[in-house]
Amino acid sequence: MLPLLKDNHYAEEKELRLVFRKTPDDLGECVRRYDAGDDVKSPYVAVKFGDIGRNNDKCKFNLSLYTDEFVKRLSEQNVDLPIWIEEGRDQEALFNELMRRINKNIPGYEKMTNKPFKIYCKGHMPISKIIVSPMENADRRMEMIKHRCNEKYWLRNVEVCVSKIPYRKSVNKK
């Protein structure tokens, strides 16, 4: 039960937690590690969500609809529009072309915190925001996560920020 318990101060983060029971044969091939800096290999579990958004007809992606004029109009109307790009070999190319059109027509889009388009790629977890927990060197960790997200095309639009909850050292830590 411990992983399911959470302090009320974290309610704003609307975090979802996946809990797995690990036995010697479970998850072994799913656990991967990445270099988190300072020669630290941080473990993570790779999870695929292939059916997310599949039945949401109002979000279907058709690149021909996203003309320059259409992108401008949508951004001016301040809509929070989810866009789902179908799985396939051309998914990254479609994503890159859509981003090219958006960046061309919305100056400063990359630096916007409230982006009008929420772009998700089917087959990948639909992450729109990552909040770094309160810790020492939280800003450094945030930059490392941003760098990691930029390595994956489907994570390039993820907002990464540091939690506003103040850091407090553990009473057990010496």
Image (tube, rainbow, N blue to C red):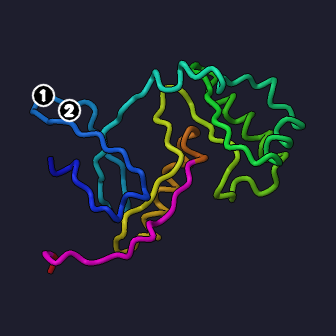
Residue at the image position 16 percent from the left and 51 percent from the top:
2
Residue 144 drawn above or below residue 78: below
Task: Say whether residue 103 is magenta.
Answer: no
User: In terms of image quadrants, where is residue 10?
Assistant: bottom left
Give the quarter of the image for residue 74.
top right
- x, y percent for residue 80: 67, 43
Q: Residue at x 75, y 48 (%)?
A: 78
Q: Secondary structure at mark 2?
A: loop
Q: Residues within 10 Å of mark 1 (few under 14, many from 20)?
A: few
Q: Quadrant of residue 57?
A: top right
**Start-end of magenta stretch:** 158-172
Q: Residue at x 47, y 63 (%)?
A: 142
The furthest residue to the right:
69
Q: Residue furthest bottom?
A: 174
Which numbered marker is on residue 162? none
Quadrant into which the C terminus falls: bottom left
Q: Residues within 10 Å of mark 2 (few under 14, many from 20)?
A: few
Q: Residue 9 location, x and y as percent?
A: 35, 65
At x 9%, y 33%, the residue is: 24
Is residue 160 covered in magenta? yes
Q: Position of residue 64 (x, y in %)?
A: 81, 23
CB under 8 Å between callouts 2 and 1?
yes
Placement of 24 over or under 35, stated as above or below: above
Residue type at the position of mark 2: Gly
Considering the whole magenta stretch, tell me its main secondary structure: loop
According to the picture, the residue beneath numbered tag 1 turns out to be 25
User: For mark 2, what is the residue?
Assistant: 28
* Gap in angstroms between the C-alphas marked 2 and 1: 6 Å
Residue type at mark 1 is Asp
**Could you tell whether 76 is left or right of 21 in the image?**
right
Image side of residue 62 versus residue 12, left or right: right
- Compared with residue 17, is residue 123 higher up or lower down, i.e. above or below? above
